[in-house]
Amino acid sequence: MISRRPRAGLAGRLSQLTSLREGQGVSRTKTVGVVRDGSIVALKKGVEPLITVLDKARTEGRPPRSTEYMHVSDLIGKCTRKLALVERVGMQAQSQSLNYFDALTFAQGDAIHDVIRNRASLAAPDQVWGNWQCRCGTKTTRQPCLRSEVDQSLCTACKTPMDRYKEIEVRDEEYKITGSPDLILYTANLKALHVTELKSISQDQWKELARPKPDHVLQTVFYWHLMQRAGYRLTNMVSILYATKGWLFTGSPFKEYLVNPKENLSRLDPLIADALAIQQSRKGGKLPGKTCPSPTSPDAKQCPVCQVCFNIGDVLPVTVSIKHARRR
């Protein structure tokens, strides 16, 4: 049974308004006392330049992923021993906060991806396939579909339709690996899905780009492999679309490459082995091997688990703590 609170009459509302005026139930905030008299004063020393403020600023990075599943992007070009140790010894990875240079870089890349997906879905609503949500994220499609199939009713919170693309997530229970392709296209004549990865790079990198980067090929092929194992009907090729961050308003800002995933499947074997090794380490099995030759190597110096990594063997007890691991 659903009960409803009785509506307050006009007297009740006026009484509530009076209480608010008297300061009851109002959160008082201390203000700096801004003067509004129209006067102009001379700028004195002590006013910090905005650039200096930004140099000090740090923003929250991307939220940490669940440790139950390894994400494809965590396995490519990353130290899986570090990932295993961070999880096993209960240590939090280094702060996810970013300086404003990194924040701008990520924001620029995200914005480019959003524009590409939005324009593609507008131009070909019967081809762009995925999850869809409103601008505030309150209203989301229950399952992936084409843009043309999305319910066009507005979200009651932000008053916008579900026209914002949201990547699908594919999980493999055997590998304990998850992946989220940037964009998926539906080919009606084949009744199949086409995996597409989006990459934004600097103008200098874009000018020199003659073929897709190996790590990007590996990542895209891995997404294709996970989707195939999940039972999706797929095309026999994948696409990698590069966009320059420094487009000069002349020519195309894009370069697109087709890749045959079957020709690259064997390259996934070491990554799958790394993911399985992390699973074994969770049960007290052997840890993945070291990637740094010594604790003084550049990557090791910046690693949050460097000390633990070089002070233990290849097997970590299930109940080990950071304190004990460092003493070994």
Image (tube, rainbow, N blue to C red):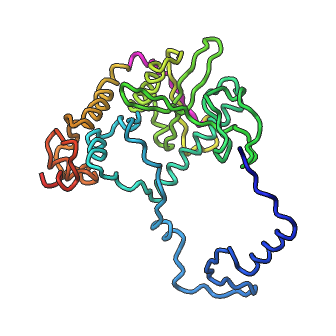
The residue located at (60%, 84%) in the rendering is 43
Which of these two is toward me, 42 or 289?
A: 289
Magenta part of the chain: 253-264
Is 87 placed above or below 264 here? below
Judge whether residue 261 is colored magenta. yes
Judge whether residue 324 is colored magenta. no
Return the x and y of residue 321 as percentages of the image width and height: 22, 51
Quadrant of residue 326 within the rendered picture: bottom left
Return the x and y of residue 217 as percentages of the image width and height: 42, 28
Left or right: where 77 falls relative to 189:
left
The residue located at (51%, 25%) in the rendering is 257
Is 207 placed above or below 184 here? below
Quadrant in which the N terminus appears: top right
Which of these two is toward me, 45 or 18?
A: 18
Farthest residue, direction front: 1
Which of these two is toward me, 27 or 228?
A: 27
Quadrant of residue 10 within the rendered picture: bottom right
The residue located at (45%, 29%) in the rendering is 171
